Amino acid sequence: MNYQTSSYTPNFSSKSSFAYSGSRTMVSPAAILEHVLNIWLISQMDHEPVPMPAVGQFNPWIADGSDAGSMVSDRDAVYNRQYSQGTVNGFNSSMRQGGGTISFPIHRSLSGTLSRTAGMSGGEVEIVHQPSFKGPAHRTISRITNRNRMSMGSVSGSMQRQMSGGSAYAVGTLSRAMSVKSMHSVGRGMDIYGGITSLDMPTAVQHLGEPDPELQVLGAAYIQHECYNDSDAKVAVRRLKGIGELVKLFNSEHQEVQRFATGATRNLIFENMDNKVALIEEGGIPQLIEALRENDDELRKNITGILWNLSSKDNLKQKLARETLPELTEKILIPLSERESGNPLSPSEGEIFYNTTGCLRNLSSVNEKTRQQMRELPGLVDSLVNYIKSSLDDKSEDKGVENALCILRNLSYQLYHEIPPSALMRLEGPTRGQDSGKGDAIGCFTPQSRKAKNGNNQDISTFTEVARVPKGMEWLWHPQIVGVYNRVLHQCEINSTAREAAAGALQNITAGDKRWASVLSRVALEQERMLPVILDLLRTNNDLELRSLTGFLRNMSRHAKDKNDMSTKVVNILVTKLPADGHQKEPSSEVVVNICGVLNNLVTSSYLAARDITFFDGLPKLVGIKDTHDNSSGKVKAAKAASTVLCNMFQYKKLHKTYKTKGFMRRDFEDMV
C-alpha cells in the first residue's frame, strides 16, 4: 500500500521590507498574507507478509524489511509579496486579514503515486502578477490626479485581492511597471491611468495589433488591469484572440511593450486553464524563452512568474520541462547561484530565482522522465546546491533556499531505482573480500586511522565509489550532501518547510536495501552525528515535518550497527510521541507507522529497546494503538505496525514477568488476526 500526502501551509511574516529594482523601497503592510499550496507525495512500502500464527502461538522475529518510503513534494505557485532578500519567513496555520484571523485546514490524502490531488477547495493556487495599478477597486485609479508627478518607474501602492472563492486574501505591493517612459507620454498624450479608463476590451485588444508601441502599451496595460480580478475579462481576451496578439509582443523592440505584454499575460493565465492552453497553442513558451535573452529584471520577473503559473498543472509539466529547463538553467540558475559571498543577489534577482525554482519545484514532481532530465541537465543540480550552501550562513530562511531543497528532495525520490545502471553499479561497490581498503578519505577519518581500519567503519572512511569533488547528479548521493542537509536542519530555525525538505531528502537517500543507502545512513549517524539534532527536532507538533524526521530516523535505525546504543537514546523520546490509542488524530498514522518501524528495528536486535519501551510505559500505548481504532486504512496500518513491535517484544522471555506485573497478558502481544 502506498501513501500520498498533500498539504496546504499558509505563510505569514510580520517583518519584511519590499525592495524594488528601482530606487524606491516600501515597507510592507502590517499583515502580509500568503497563500501556499504544498503537495507532498509520500510512498511507503508495506511490511513483508508473514504467516499468521495459531492462537496463543508467536512467530519468531517478525521481520520488517521496509523503510520509510521516499517522498516527493510538489508546490503550486502562489501569489506572493514582492520578494525581499531580507525577509524573515515565518510559518503558521492562519492568515490575518484586518484584525481577525482566517484559519485554513490542513488537508491530507493518501496515495503512493505521483498523481496530484487538490489540497484545498477553490482550485489551483498560483503566483499572480502584481499589476501596475492598484486593484481591484477602480476607485484607486480615480485618486491619481497629478499626472505630472507620476512616472513608470515610481508608481507603487498596495493591493488586496480575494482568492479561491472567498477562502483567502492576498495582500501585496505594486511592482514597478516601467522605467523608460513617463506615464503621461503613453497613449498619445494621455497618462496610462487616464487612458485605460476610457478603453474597453475590444479596443484594448485592437491596440495590441497597432504598429504604435504607445498604443500597444496602453492596450496591454488595460488587459493587465482588467484581468487582475475579473474572470470574465480573461474569457473576453481569449475570445477576442488577444492572447496571440500578446505573444507577438513578448519580443518587441520596445522594452516597455515587453514588460506590459508579459505582465498582462501573467494575470490572464492566473486560475484560468483555458488561457494557459491558449498561451501554449499560440507558441507562447518559445517566445517567453526567447525573451529571456533580455537582461532586464522586470521582464524576467514576469516571464518566470508566467512559467511558474504554467507549471502548476500536471498536463503542462512535461512540455514545459522539455522546452524551458535548459534555458532556465543556463540563463538564470547558473548565473544567480555563482555569486560571490560579498556580492549578494539584488531583491529583483532574488525574486527571479524564487520564481524559477518555484517552477522547477513543480516540474520535478511530475514523473520519472522529467526527474531524469533534470538530474542529467548540466549545471542544474550544482546550481541548487551552490545556492543553498552560499545562503546557509546568513540567508538560511530565504524562500529560494526552500525551493532548492524541495527540488533536491524530489530529484532524490526513488533515487536508486532511477539513476543510471552504471552509477548504481559503482555505488554498490566491490565485495568486502575484494575491497583493498585503499582510497581517498572523505570526512574525518583517514584510511590509516584506527577507525578506518576497523571494518565496521570502512564504508564511511573510504569512498572510492564517488569523486572527491562531486559534480552534477552525483551531488544527490554524495556523502557531502548529508553534511549540507545537516546544516540546514541546524540553521533553519523558522522555515519548517525547508527543514522538512532536508529531512525528506535524507529519507530518500537512505531508503531501501541498496548498499549505498546503508552507507549514507552511517555517514549521518557516525560522521555527521545527526541523531541529536533529529531527536531535538522531534519536539515539533508539525505533522508533516514529523513524517520526514521519523521516516529518516526509521531508515537510520535499520542500518545502525550499534542498536543498543541507539535504543538508549531514542526509545524514551519516541514512546512519548506515540498516541494513547488508535482514536487520536495526532500524530498522523504515517508518523505512528514510522515510530513503530524505528522501535521494531531496534527491538529485533536489542533487548534494551524492549526493556526501555516497557520502562517508559510504551506498552499501554502500543496495545491501545493495536486494539482501538476506527478501521480506516491508515489506522489499521498503524495497528499492524504496533502489533509487530509487541509480537517481537514477547520474544524476550526474561521480560515476561515485567509484562505481567504491568498488567499485560499473552494475548496483548499476539499478532493481529
Image (cartoon, helix red, strand yellow):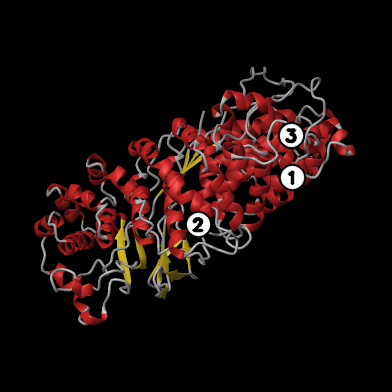
Count neighbours of disc 1 (C-alpha within 10 A) and say few if under 14, some if 14 to 19, many if 20 or more: many
Residue drawn at 33 percent across, 38 percent down? 316
Residue drawn at 60 percent across, 56 percent down? 390
In the picture, the disc for residue 570 is 1
Amino acid identity at mark 3: Phe
Check the picture and name the quadrant holding the C terminus. top right
Left or right: 246, with 353 as reference point = left
Would you place residue 461 above or below residue 307 in this image?
A: above
Would you place residue 126 above or below residue 71 in this image?
A: below
Amino acid identity at mark 1: Val
In terms of secondary structure, where does tag 1 sit? Answer: helix
Q: Residue furthest right?
A: 450
In terms of secondary structure, where does tag 3 sit? Answer: loop
Give 508 or 615, whichever is nearer the viewer: 508
For marks 2 and 1, the one nearer the N-term is: 2
Amino acid identity at mark 2: Lys
- Residue 413 at what x, y percent from top left? 54, 35
Q: Which residue is mark 3?
A: 463
User: Which of label 3 and label 1 is nearer to you?
Assistant: 3
In the picture, the disc for residue 399 is 2
Q: Residue furthest front?
A: 253
Residue drawn at 61 percent across, 36 percent down? 474
In terms of secondary structure, where does tag 2 sit? Answer: helix
For marks 3 and 1, the one nearer the N-term is: 3
Count neighbours of disc 2 (C-alpha within 10 A) and say few if under 14, some if 14 to 19, many if 20 or more: many
- Residue 463 at what x, y percent from top left? 74, 34
Would you place residue 240 above or below residue 259 in this image?
A: above
Count neighbours of disc 3 (C-alpha within 10 A) and say few if under 14, some if 14 to 19, many if 20 or more: many
- Residue 242 at what x, y percent from top left? 16, 51
